[in-house]
Amino acid sequence: MSSNKPLGDFLRSRRYLLDPAALGVVSARRRRTPGLRREEVAARAGISCEWYIKLEQGREVSASPETIAALARALALDDTEAAHLRKLAARQAAPRFVREKVPETVEAIVRALSEPAYVTGARLDVLCWNDAADRIFGFSGMSEAERNILRYMMASPAARALFGSSWTAEAQRITALFRATYDQYRGDLLFEDMVVTLQGVSAEFRAWWLSYRVATPSSGRKMLLSEGHDGTSFVYATFQANDDPALKLAVYTRVT
């Protein structure tokens, strides 16, 4: 079995996205697949094609930081993608996922907030929330398995109604967040079961999963259409907990 299949999969997915014409790469041979050929990526990175093929196959080879940086440039990766490539190249052993527990002090603070707030773990499970968030998202009415941000976005009709025309962009963003974490836990049954379940219920998820987009948490603005908050605009941000870096506090604040 390949020793670093996630690295190979990621390299291949980024190679397929490149536009040869935009990069000034000219070839007399007809292209049978989208993107650049392996030898073209290797040439742009200044490495041998044989070496690049081994990396894309996930073979037992070690790439230096300089090689990884050259590949990031050759594949035109943005900062988030380049950071993900470095993590994959490090080949750290995948940890076993254990559903997180929210410290009592953090939970007390979340419940005391007047604005919508909730805490998620590495798999995007919603671990605690306050009344304001519950009135919008209805977390208390979900089973523990359903109480997951990615599953909610992809499998719940309520999520599509809540986000309206912005649902596609938000669902893609959440999928990309999960994808970045998934590669750290690849092979873990709880992560794998999530992927299989969502591939079975959502055509959008199947397509976005194959695109291999990755993202990191960010702040922004959302327009939510839930009952009692029709057309309400929120700004939101996430904060990492000191007790456990996997815990993320999401806070929403109404704006006009």
Image (spheres, grey):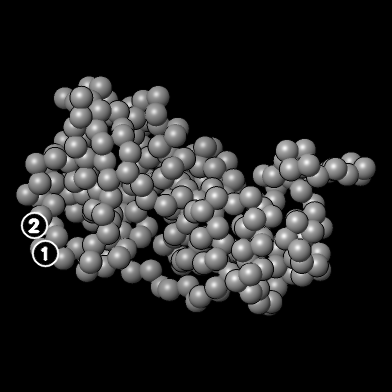
Q: From the viewer's perspective, is 137 left or right of 173?
A: left
The residue to which callout 1 is attached is 104
Position of the C terminus, as image quadrant, is: top left
Task: Name the secondary structure under disc 2.
Answer: helix
> Which quadrant of the view contains residue 105?
bottom left
- Which residue: 32% across, 63% down? 246
Q: Residues within 10 Å of mark 1 (few under 14, many from 20)?
A: few
- Which of these two is toward me, 152 or 56? 56
- Which residue: 46% across, 66% down? 185
Is 223 placed above or below 175 here? Answer: above
Tell me, yes or no, whether the two marked residues, 2 and 1, touch with CB atoms within 8 Å: yes
Is 196 placed above or below 171 here? Answer: below
Disc number at residue 155? Answer: none
> Which quadrant of the view contains residue 9?
bottom right
Residue 85 appears in view: yes
> Which quadrant of the view contains residue 229?
top left
- 3D distance between C-alphas at marks 2 and 1: 6 Å
Is 211 placed above or below 160 here? Answer: below
Q: Residues within 10 Å of mark 2 (few under 14, many from 20)?
A: some
- Which of these two is toward me, 147 or 88? 88
Disc number at residue 108? Answer: 2
**Disc 1 marks which amino acid?**
Glu
Residue 21 rendering spot, x and y as whole percentages: 77, 38
Residue 140 rendering spot, x and y as whole percentages: 18, 45
Residue 93 rendering spot, x and y as whole percentages: 50, 76
- Which residue: 76% across, 63% down? 46
**Disc 2 marks which amino acid?**
Ala
Residue placed furthest toward the top: 230
Residue 43 rendering spot, x and y as whole percentages: 79, 59
- Which residue: 27% across, 59% down? 240
Residue placed furthest toward the right: 28
Q: From the viewer's perspective, is 32 left or right of 19?
A: right
